[in-house]
Amino acid sequence: MADEIIHKGIPASPGISIGKAYLYTRSTFEVDTEYLKSGEIEKDLDEFKKALELSKKELIKIREYSQEKIGKKNTLIFDAQIEILNDRFFIASIENRVQNEKRTSSFIFDQEMKKLGEVLLSVQDEYLKERVNDINDVRNRVMRNMKKEKIVSKVEEYSIVISHELTPADTILFSKRKVQGYATDKGGTTSHAAIVSRALRVPAVVGMKDISKSIVSGELIIIDGFNGLIITNPSENTLSDYKIKFAELKIYEKELNEVIDLPSETADKKAVELTANIEFDEEIDFIVNTGHCGIGLYRTEHLFLEAGEFPSEERQIEEYSHIADMTYPNKVTIRTYDIGGDKLTPRSEKEDNPFLGWRGIRICLDRVDIFKEQLSALLIASSKKNVRILLPMISSLIEVIKAKEILKEVMEDLDKQNIHYDKNIEVGIMIEVPSAYFIADELAKEVDFFSIGTNDLIQYILAVDRGNEYISGLYQEFHPAVIRAIKSIAESAHKNNIKISVCGEMASDPLATAVLIGLGIDELSVSPSVFSEIKRNIRKLNFEEAKVLCDDIIKLTKEIDIRTKVSEFYEEKIMVGIKY
Ligand code: PEP
Ligand code: MG
């Protein structure tokens, strides 16, 4: 028997499957390069139109199916693809070129789609680069329909699909065949096929270089989405190890399903509030149907990004009231605009150091008109008394005092108009700038709660840009400076009798749960995708033991030592018996 081979790639979606490989090769469609005679142009354009309509219909069907399977949020991919085919200017420019240049529409369409792809490839953003795959999918779909060929999906049920690359549409359509995993030569973790696999909760490994050349359909393989592995010709030992891991995983998944509606408290009954981070209106489904929890961070920047300008007060009242109604009786913490930094700003000229620039509360205090509209909308949405206001990027006491004065003026205006709102609305601040950490004690006296934005706090404390891939290894949530800062901020909050939450990504890292709770954090606001995992961790945890762990790590001086200590604690107390 041939030797076992372990192929390594990039882990794109966690999970383990053992099954038969199915090698999927997508047909390629050649363009018609010949010139058209005058009499042929109309027929060619007519066929192009029909192919566009058919492609649109296919995508709309796939979008409907995926909405059912993976929720509305993940179907934005297909919206974007449909939009290309609906773009009247884009299509008209292709038709004009066909008329003028007398080349086939397949030839011109192919050229124009390549141009679109090149634009995306030229940007310094991995996510946008991955979108080229989505553009190619649209191109191939139209080409196939011009050749009047049908989609073939003869994928065998329960197989693990191996392919050079996969489109989100392939991934979602194959899921009808109960596919158990995906591995591709190309792609990164932000490719839509990877995003769709995660939403489907199917293991996936991407960037495997030439896996599609090393595997034949029908052979037994193992896919390990945790470690980014495909194992061919697995030995008896490997196979039995993976069968055990697979069984453990099933038990773990069952535990996660069971825990979702149980109280969020540690094994020794310390309540830890678990809330969700919500960025888009669509995500509210999770709060209503699954999490039944409050919202620890509602980012409002998307309103600005969608409109390309500050939204009207009416639009905001509608949005915030909807969120507050849907979350009621639980609380929703709505953060005032945190534009600037890596997000869009209302200024057209670029800043040299946007992360140290005109951002968050700084913009709001300079544009009081805009800030007042937002505060007014928030107050009007607060009549059921479940809205809290959160101010971002606070770096000095004076900013808090000014923001509260403006809030008071807005309240007086509403009083004059007899508009009902929560007069005791809680106002909190993000602690995400080092200066706020140093003056946390004074700030705590001015506000009702703290929320630590670890995404920014880590970047500013360590001077490591949160989005720079070259130094991503230096972006360390377990850096001793970060751990000590969180402890000290929590102490300041408690000394002044206010609650403290963490709403940065660190709260969504399952390995950080014990640390944050042990350091005294009262609330974790996490991404919906890890909500049940974090709840399970909280319930497994003993608060007194977590405090002892933190007493130990606070003395350590190296990130690696802290991480090792925390990992050991997890193996012993939280993940007991589960290894993958
Ligand atoms: C943070 O900085 O941790 C945070 C939650 O805010 P944002 O990621 O929106 O900057
Ligand atoms: Mg932030």
Image (cartoon, rainbow, N blue to C red):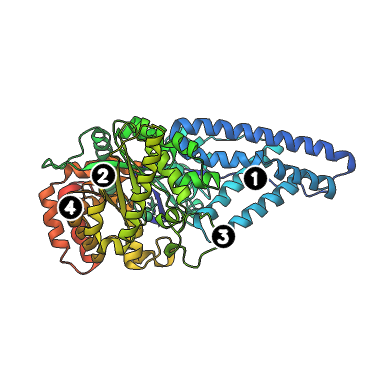
Q: Is residue 52 above or below residue 107?
A: above
Tag 4 or tag 3, which sits nearer the N-term? 3
- Is the CB–ligand 1 distance for label 3 below 8 Å? no
Contact between labelled residues 4 and 3, with CB atoms less than 8 Å apart: no
Disc 3 and disc 1: Cα gap in Å? Answer: 21 Å
Disc 2 and disc 1: Cα gap in Å? Answer: 41 Å
Left or right: 163 as drawn, with respect to 38: left
The residue under label 3 is 123
The location of residue 465, given as percent across then percent down, is 40, 64
The residue under label 1 is 139
Contact between labelled residues 4 and 2, with CB atoms less than 8 Å apart: no
Residue 534: mark: 2
Helix, strand or loop at label 1? It is helix
Which amino acid type is shown beneath numbered disc 1? Arg
Disc 2 and disc 4: Cα gap in Å? Answer: 28 Å
Which amino acid type is shown beneath numbered disc 4? Asn
The residue under label 4 is 496
Disc 3 and disc 4: Cα gap in Å? Answer: 47 Å
Q: Nearer the viewer, residue 199 or 160?
A: 199
Tag 1 or tag 4, which sits nearer the N-term? 1
Which amino acid type is shown beneath numbered disc 3? Val
Tag 3 or tag 2, which sits nearer the N-term? 3
Q: Nearer the viewer, residue 315 or 307?
A: 315
Helix, strand or loop at label 2? It is helix
Which label sits in the foreground, 3 or 4?
A: 4
Left or right: 497 as drawn, with respect to 319: left
